[in-house]
Amino acid sequence: MIRTLIPSLLLAAAAALPAAAGPVSFDWALVDNAGNAGDPQPQGTFGAVGYAYRISKHEVTNAQYVEFLNAVAAADGFALYSTFMGSDARGGITRSGAPGSYSYATKPNMDNKPVNYVSFFDAMRFTNWLHNGQGAGDTETGAYTIGNGLDEVRSASAKFWIPSEDEWYKAAYHDATAGTAGVYFDYATGSDSVPTVATANSVGDISNPGVGVVNYEDGAYWNGQDGNVTTVGSAGIASASPYGTFDQNGNVFEWNEAVISSSSRGLRGGSWSSRSWSRLRTIFRPSSGRPAGEGNDVGFRVATVPEPSSLLMVVLAAGGFLVRKRA
């Protein structure tokens, strides 16, 4: 039985792996402790996830989104580019050329800032493109079949996707050292203490990195802006979540898959413009995320399946269990 089951599990694991990497790659954080208890809040219970997954350590950057635009948006029939990305000093991408031959580039000092002015539709199309191998990959099907912005459901075979609210919440707030216990921090810095407001240098790196530093309350003054996005991860490892993600508090609000109402998708985490620490906490759940909405304080990150070594551990654990059962 072991001889037939293990190869089957390995084949299933291999089939679930993402396609070969293209020009856009990510640093991933493994979120394990599968089957953890959720965190009760007034709006519901959040953070319980019954499987391991990976989530990008950083928000999707302007440089990564430019690769996407240059691959699929020469005509830009789906309005993947917002002109505010170019006209707003907090946006990070310019467009040149004419319809059918558009090209895109990052602004100076903006390549590793989080992309903003992206809708939930844009985020779905980006993950479809990743799922389909990048390059000329389809944007309309894959992880999601694009519909009205509220009726899309993640495909069971998705290789990359927008995190569910529970996946996002767990990666941000769950105490990774607690195993499957329902222990959560108030903030995505591995702490219950109110975060320190980030400041920025002249190129948009956080200039006061350290413990519990978050870009919010318009503290990052640079590029002539009283509050701005900052380089992803530049608060440093001491401000990371317990699973090793950065900026899940502050910088930009991030899309998640939750359908909040008949007109809204989920947003979490607060942004550079959040005027209070209360918008960073577990308890804060905005209700105004229209799927087509865009803003200079909204971006996203992506999730994927565990890496091969993690899947192999699952397979070996299953095999070991069966051996013990037969002994």
Image (cartoon, helix red, strand yellow):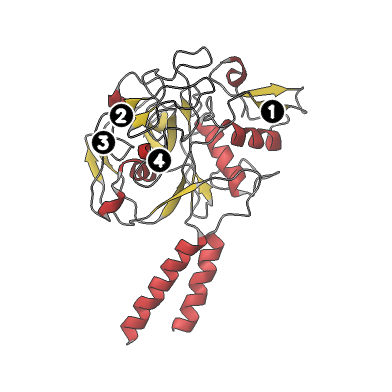
Measuring from the top left, give residue 185's x and y in whole percent: 26, 40
**Mark seen at residue 212:** none
Label 4 sits on residue: 237
- Circle 2 or circle 3, nearest the eye: 2
Q: Quadrant of residue 262?
A: top left
Measured Cα–Cα span from mark 2 to mark 1: 36 Å
Q: Residue at x 66, y 44 (%)?
A: 23
Q: Residues within 10 Å of mark 1 (few under 14, many from 20)?
A: many
Label 2 sits on residue: 195
Left-right relation of 72 to 61: right
Residue type at numbered disc 1: Tyr
Label 1 sits on residue: 104
For label 3, the SS is loop
Residue type at numbered disc 4: Ile
Q: Residues within 10 Å of mark 4 (few under 14, many from 20)?
A: some
Measured Cα–Cα span from mark 2 to mark 4: 14 Å
The mark that comes first in sequence, 3 or 4, is 3
